[in-house]
Image (tube, rainbow, N blue to C red):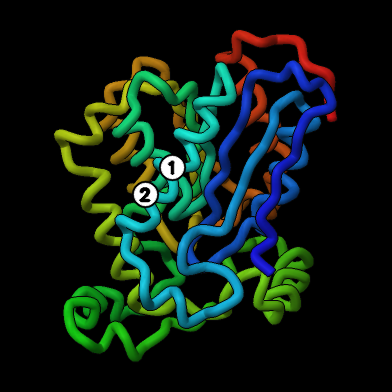
Amino acid sequence: MSLDFEFLNEDRNTKRAVLLFHGMTGSPYEMKKYGQFLCSQGYDVYCDCLPGHGDKVEEIYTVTYQDWLNYAYSRFEELYEKYDEVYLSGLCLGAVLALGVAEKYPDKVSGIVALSTTLFLDGWRLPWYKVLIPLGLSTIIRFYYTYPECEPHGIKNERTRSVVKKLLGKSDVGMIEFPMTCIFELLKLSRFVRKKELIQKVVTPILLIHSEEDDLTSPRSAKVVYSGISSEDKDLIILNDSYHMVLYDNEKEYVFNKAVEFLNSHSKQKECVPC
C-alpha cells in the first residue's frame, strides 16, 4: 500500500486545492492528519507516494531527483487545470520539491507552506562522521549502504515517538532506514533548487516553519531559502519545542493553525463549506 489520498471538500464549488509532498523515505501517511485538517478548513487536498517510495523498497535505488521533480511538476499541472488556486506544502524532501515547482511555475503557484525544509543534512542527530558522507555518496558505496532510522525518529514528544516506532514496522508507513542513494539524490536536488539563478525566481508567497532543534536539518536550510527567494510575502517561524517531524510533535496544532492562517490570508475564495 502506498496510502495515496485525496480529501475533497463537501462544497463541490471549491476552486482551491493543496498539493502535499511527503518526506524522504516517508509516505503519504505522514501527511494524512495534516491533509484532513486542511480539508476541514475548506481545501481539496491531494497527496501521492513519491517515485521510489511505496510497496517495493528496492525501487528507491532506481529513481533520481529529476524523477521526483517531474512527478511534482506533473501533479501540479494536473491540479492547475482544475483549480483557480493551487497551494503547495511539503515536509523535508517535500518542502524542497515545493520550491522546485515554484521555480518552474513562479506565476502559477498560489502559495507554499514549507515544513522542515531539507537542503542540508546538518542536524544534531547525525553522527560525527557526517562530514565523510559526501565521499561515500560519490562512489559505488552508496548502492550498498543504508543509514538506519534511529532515535529520536524526528520527534521530541516521547509518547508520540513510541507510537511512531511501532508504525515504522509497517512498510506502507515509511522506510526504517535511509538508503544512501536516496540521500545522494536529495542532496543533488538541494543543489539544483538552491542555485542562485533558480531560487531567485521564487516570487510565491511562502511560510517556512522549522525547528530550532531539528535533528535532521538545522534552521540553516530555511534561512537560506528565506534570504534567497524573491518573494515579497515571506515569513519564517522557528519552533522551540519540536524536532524534524513538526506535523506530529509538541507544536503540531500551532503548525496546523499557522498553515491554514497563511492559506486563508492568500485565498480569494473565502467561503467554503468544511468537509
Compared with residue 144, is residue 271 higher up or lower down, i.e. above or below?
above
> Residue 70's mark?
2
> Residue 26's mark?
none
| Residue drawn at point x = 71 percent, y = 68 percent | 161
Quarter of the image with the C terminus is top right
Of 7 and 97, the residue lying toward us: 7
Residue 120 falls in which quadrant of the image? bottom left
Q: Secondary structure at mark 2?
A: helix
Q: Residues within 10 Å of mark 2 (few under 14, many from 20)?
A: some
Residues tagged 2 and 1 counted as in contact (Cβ below 8 A): yes
Quarter of the image with the N terminus is bottom right
Compared with residue 127, is residue 27 higher up or lower down, i.e. above or below?
above
| Residue drawn at point x = 66 percent, y = 10 percent | 269
Image location (x, y in percent) of residue 169: 69, 81
Q: Amino acid at mark 1?
A: Ser
Image location (x, y in percent) of residue 199: 25, 35
Left or right relative to 84: residue 183: left
Q: Amino acid at mark 2?
A: Asn
Residue 152 in view, yes or no: no
Compared with residue 106, is residue 198 higher up or lower down, i.e. above or below?
below
Image location (x, y in percent) of residue 261: 65, 22
Q: Secondary structure at mark 1?
A: helix
Residue 51 in view, yes or no: yes
Left or right relative to 17: residue 227: left
> Residue 74's mark?
1
Q: Residues within 10 Å of mark 1 (few under 14, many from 20)?
A: few
Q: From this viewpoint, which residue is outermost toward the left?
A: 197
